[in-house]
Amino acid sequence: MACGFYSMSHGSVPPKLGLTSADSFIDYNSRDLFYDILERKKMPSKKRRRKEERPKIHPKNKYSDNPPDFALLASLYPTFKPFVFYTREGRPRIDWTDFNATRELTRVLLLHDHNLHWWIPDGQLCPTVPNRSNYIHWIEDLLSSHIIPRDNSNGDNVRGFDIGTGANCIYPLLGASLLGWSFVASDMTDVAIEWAERNVKNNPNISELIEIRKVKCSQNTLSFEGLSGESSYSEEREGLPSSSLDMPASEDKSYNGPAILVDVVRDGETFDFCMCNPPFFESFEEAGLNPKTSCGGTYEEMVCAGGEKAFITRIIEDSVVLKQSFRWYTSMVGRKVNLKFLVSKLREVGVTVVKTTEFVQGKTCRWGLAWSFVPPAMKIVTPHVTEKKILSFMLEGIQRQFGAIHVLQSVESFFLAGGASCKLNASSFVVDITASANHCNALLNNDVKHIDEVASCSNVQEAPSNLCFRILVFQQIPGTLLVKGSLQHRDSALSGLFSSIVQQLEASLRQKFCKEKTGTNYI
């Protein structure tokens, strides 16, 4: 994924690859609509705002300030030199339609920058190093944020589970070499297991940290389900054209393939996280829509009945069974429309925390989805997962008998039911909220009271330790409202809970006012 990042030579401007905070929940369309209507004169142009707010490569990523230098790599590694050519401007490039070129590039990057010895046979999925590092560092942020408490029974040791590691075994190799994490890496095909084990054994300094575990396939398993996969990629875009990311979701299909977590995770095992590049596609024809790339990928790695939507839904179902066996469950998501469905699914099963991030390469986006069943802790988060100051979401399909004032009153009731202090201004459609740590905990755990029981809580005083924010409701078009949350004191110790509380509010309002209850409109 995001292989185009490699095409940048030393001295050229890094492309727009990267990672937002783990708590990015703003819908860009909603945000732009709000600013265009209300603050057009105050704000810079839309293009400037978008350019300034585009996700960046993770600051801990080895390639954040030093993109791969093709010319240097060609001079140091003779096996890579034949694949490098130069443009009229003198910039080194490789032919992205040549699988051998992309594989050799990944090999030399892993060796040069990570001291990892690596190889995969022809046709297997060839991963990208910078983007894989982004996923690793995002999980590192989640683990270090203390959004949820950690079980100290394993000391400082971090243990992960890579679902569908593939022959490349890239995540365990990077996680172990960069951060010293231990992994269980699963897959179902003989080729994937054989080469993953080879890649581990060829790196004896970390081999004891990685266990390769084969998934048993029952006789009822259909041959087209895969355990790992992703799309092809190019120097400008990855996999499917950007327009395809907004294609309508296909008809619902259930996953019928091999075990994913349940029956693979052993009794009594616990992990800090799981991670997954799911099979993005429902057919091999769909997976091959980008003719400009050749990064391999077997049928099992790239295709699954129901695509990523069905596959990740099964991970969610498994997580309901395993609950707190994992601190964090995570997965890559390829289509925004599927991310909205999956977030809604997570709310249905009662997770305590949901986090998302965005990985951007050129004109193509991929998303990270994380969730947990561990009750959140009331601690300040690290800078890389600090909440955004302004969050917004759209309420569409509002029933005719309801208007903005009804939604505004429901916002007030929602927070009063959690014990927070509320001040409603009907003329400006604003509710100002002040919530203590106990109030935040009640809201996040749905521990609400009847309004008549909490009327006395409306005089909670603002204090540095309280969470203070404002909710505004705006009419867009008939049947559509924009709800905006604005954090008043970002330095509060509770600011890390802001987006989670906005999530709970959005779910409550959608359930009460909207005809369609399965989707969400913020990312």
Image: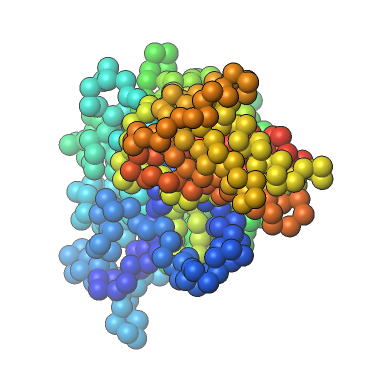
- Give the side of residue 112 with respect to residue 50, left or right: left
* Residue at 63% across, 21% down: 452
- Vertical relation: 86 (above or below) 127: below
Foreground residue among 494 and 87: 494
**Residue 373 x/y as whole percent:** 47, 24
- Which colour style is shown? rainbow
How many labels were placed on the picture? 0
* Residue at 66% across, 38% down: 409
**Residue 152, picture quadrant:** top left
- Residue 186 visible in the snapshot: no
- Give the side of residue 149 with respect to residue 460, left or right: left
Foreground residue among 76 and 365: 365
Q: Quadrant of the N terminus?
A: bottom left
- Vertical relation: 13 (above or below) 334: below
**Residue 14, picture quadrant:** bottom left
Which residue is most to the bottom?
88
- Vertical relation: 510 (above or below) 69: above
- Residue 489 visible in the snapshot: yes
Foreground residue among 30 and 296: 30
**Residue 348 x/y as whole percent:** 62, 29
* Residue at 22% across, 35% down: 180
**Residue 388 x/y as whole percent:** 43, 49
* Residue at 27% across, 58% down: 63
Foreground residue among 351 and 435: 435
- Give the side of residue 228 with respect to residue 413, left or right: left
**Residue 145 x/y as whole percent:** 33, 36
